[in-house]
Image: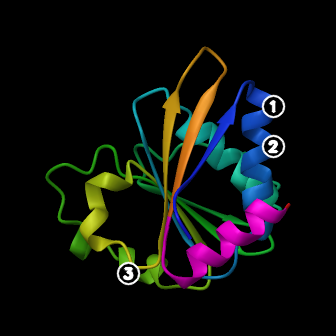
Amino acid sequence: MAAMKFTTKSLEETKSLGRRLGSILNPGQVIALEGDLGAGKTTFTKSIALGLGVDDVVTSPTFNLINEYMGRLPVYHFDVYRLDGIDADYMGFDEYLFSDGVCIIEWADKIKELLPEDTLYIYIKKISETGREFDFKPNGKKSNEVMEVLMSC
């Protein structure tokens, strides 16, 4: 499936898109989020987690690198913004990236070489105070299947 763009005009539309995405994710899905500071990566992650049934308060793991949550699937929320100078190969990322959980990675471009081939890349662009443009690029069978379902709901 080709890349798809979604445009939201409000925070509620952004949250709705994230919840819909979360509700259809499957075990082993990797979501790579990219975008400028303040684009809404953490807000979108919170919404995806809600769609996955996470009841906990989702916060950015900027200083921890990863937060774990339990919903209908385990959710592993990475923020690799501060990863400069750290050898990610030795941080155990593979244990998460190739698990039966869902990995959501903010600033994924910093560890792109470590990501599995089957990754759903989402670039978020701020187009107004509350509006966002989401550029979804599926890469692999699972990611393409998720996109097909997302387009039908």
Query: Badge 1 is on which residue?
Result: 12
Q: CA distance from mark 2 to mark 1?
A: 6 Å
Is disc 1 placed on a helix, strand or loop? helix
Q: CA distance from mark 2 to mark 3?
A: 30 Å
- Quadrant occupied by the C terminus: bottom right
**Amino acid type at mark 1:** Glu
Query: Badge 2 is on which residue?
Result: 16
List x then y, in percent, for residue 51: 80, 57
List x then y, in percent, for residue 126: 52, 25
Mark seen at residue 94: 3
Question: What's drawn in magenta, residue-wise?
Answer: 138-152
Question: Was residue 120 drawn as part of the magenta stretch in this picture?
Answer: no
Q: Are marks 1 and 3 in contact (CB under 8 Å)?
A: no
Q: Are marks 2 and 3 in contact (CB under 8 Å)?
A: no
- Sort mark 1 into few (<14), some (14-19) or many (20+) by Cα contacts within 10 Å: few
- Sort mark 3 into few (<14), some (14-19) or many (20+) by Cα contacts within 10 Å: some
Residue 149 picture quarter: bottom right
